[in-house]
Image (spheres, grey):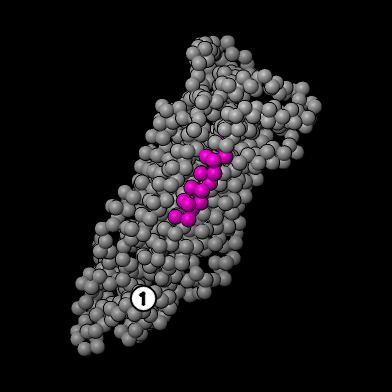
Amino acid sequence: MDTEVNFGSSSDDEMKEQKTERRGSQLPPDQRFGCFNFHPNWLQVFNHHLCLAFWIGICQLFYGFITTGYDASIVSTIQKGFGLSSADIGGTTVCYSIAQSVFGIIISHKAAHSHKGKWLGLTGLITAAGCIVYILPHLVNPSYSTLDSYQLYDNQSDFCLEHNRSIPNVCQQQNISKGVYLFIFCIGQFVLGAGTSILATVGWSYLDESVSPDISPVFTGINVSIIGLSTAFGFAFGGTALDLYVYWPFRKPGPGLTPNNPNWIGAWWLGYVLTGICVAIGSIPMFAFPRHLPNYELYKKQRKEQAIGKSSVDKQYGTNLKEIIPACKELLCNLPYVCTTLSLVGHLIVLAGMGTFLPKYLEAQYGISAADASMYSGLIIVIGMLLGVILVGILLKKKKLGVLMLAKYNWMACCLSILTAFAFIITRCPSTAIAGVNVSYFNDTSAKGTNHLAYNLSIECNLGCHCSTDNFKPVCDQRTGITYFSPCYAGCLSGNDSIAKEEIFYNCSCLSGWNLMNNSDAISQHVIMNYCPKPCNALIPFLILGTLFAFLVFCTLIPSFQIIFRCVPESQRSLALAIEKAIILVLATTPGPIIMGAFIDSACNLWKEDCGERKFCWIYDSHSLALAITGVLAIMKVFSTIFSFLTYYFMKRDIERYEVGDEQAIINENLSSASKDDQSFHEHPLLQPEDISNDLEKSVVF
């Protein structure tokens, strides 16, 4: 039979809380809001958990903004502007993850036994400094390579002309500057990783200890909601910033250089400037909060009454770094904690991978613009997050579910999410027909799936054009629905010279290959710029199923964090969150984009190559792309479901162990912990056997 932990607060506790709040002006100096010796009574209105939640939320918003949505939206711009490959970008991500893992554990352990607010303020200022470091390549870069190579009025290479020539090889010059820029980006990501390493550990723990356990799930839900909102905000702002010229507001782009031009470089640096300013402002109030907010002792008592299993035994590890090892060992032997963390790994591999590549998937699968893809990605994340996190947070507060029921609910949500993973394969579209790539110029699909550019793209009608594959400028034959690599490969001899919304190329000799074989006149044929529209109406169904998938993923986050809060001792919560975050960084958020990217690249039909090196994919096979992503998502969701079930199993086993009266095991654990350090025993006296028996009677409801 399932049992629940009583989350209710007694009327006496509520009266104590109200009385403490009325006596705000009589608080001792170490519990008053202010800096140094400045703690006036009028400032104590800010000495409240809502104020703390607000400033943590501001920092959470911009941390998520710069490290998820915005960072993903500018990847291709940074690659193009500084000549970096996807592997180079992956290297900067590793630097971020290393800093997060190392500093997250060390600082969280120190902060757990000191002033959490001051640590949050300090790391916030470090984050602001990291934003400045990251934009240094823009500040010291006199020009961008793609802008240098852009010839304003030299568009003749677009056409089928005998004197066409490729752009001169500049590999050596690019490699010299590339190393410098890459090094600066790595340093910037390392500093950002160190600065953002403790907000989701120390910050969430600081807030959890400052509120009643009854409303803690609501604040956890708000924080997770802010993460989702920040991702959507990042995508939206990224699209806006990239529509501005990189030298905005000091220089304007030249005539003909627009966001639709492949040589365009947007203002990728703008989001880092905004984040640096806002995080610096949001970090300053953190120094003014006291070490413990009012009612801390009251809430601590309430949390102690809810403790079960190993969380009821607090060994009170000190701040000495040598105690990290035994503290970590104890946490890693806590099976509910370990299984919950591994379940989160599966969820966050999905979130990290799709957060990076969802806009790219929408653009490739449904043939929509990058701006629309970013907007739809934001909608999926925001709506799924709002439905999942806020509604679940309210549900947990109203129902006051015990920790065992939280684990059971988490397992059921994981089971349902497996089914929605197949939304990608159900709503796939046919691949765009590209002449010479997946269909031949003669409309013969026998060449489908090949990657040999020169062999497939060049046929009799464009052999004398000397076309280049350096720049991909897709054009559409509206009559047949076939897209061509460029006007040159379509055999076009001319185009409209006016600055119009729709660029048209005329006299294209390769549009109907069978007409050429019959010596028919193809001189009047024309194409328009961009891909041919896909004959597919699956976008709306995908948005619905994708939102449902996101909803179920976010449904599992609040229960998972609440389980971690309730299955570890209070003094180890910051460290537990730090270890959990390090495990997630190593096993989920770092390899997640790499795993997803590798599967997506396996579906590529046409690569962009520079100096003999693959850079990025121009054209994907839609069926292979959907199949690859569905496979990754299904595997990860099964992985999470298995460990969410194990969490439920081990927690139920622990509770049943106490139901049959095995209280002596807890007593023995307490007594053994006392022998580890006599001095620690005197400083932190442990519960006596009769106290533990009383606590068990309060905490377990039959």
Image vertical order of residue 96 relative to residue 40, above or below: below
Give the amino acid type for the residue marked by disc 1 in the picture.
Lys
Residue at 59% across / 43% down in the picture? 338
Q: Which residues are magenta?
A: 634-651
In the image, residue 256 sits, relative to residue 186, either above or below, namely: below
Verify whether residue 646 appears in magenta: yes
Q: Nearer the viewer, residue 470 or 28?
A: 28
Residue 156 drawn in magenta: no
Instruction: Residue 470: give x, y in percent of width and height.
Output: 43, 72
Q: Position of residue 162 (x, y in %)?
A: 35, 83
Badge 1: how crowded within 10 Å, few (<14), some, or many (20+)?
some
Q: At 33% from the left edge and 67% from the top edge, which residue is drawn?
A: 431
Residue 376 drawn at (x, y percent):
34, 50
Q: For numbered disc 1, what is the local secondary structure?
A: loop
Q: Residue furthest right?
A: 678
Along the line of sight, the residue nearer the viewer: 82 or 681:
681
Predominant SS of the magenta segment: helix
Please tell me in which quadrant of the rendered image residue 158 appears. bottom left
The residue lying at 50 percent from left, 55 percent from top is: 593
Q: In x, y percent, where is residue 453?
A: 41, 77
Q: Is residue 643 visible?
A: yes
- The residue where tag 1 is placed is 448
Q: State whether residue 258 appears in this view.
A: no
* 318 with respect to 404 (left or right): right
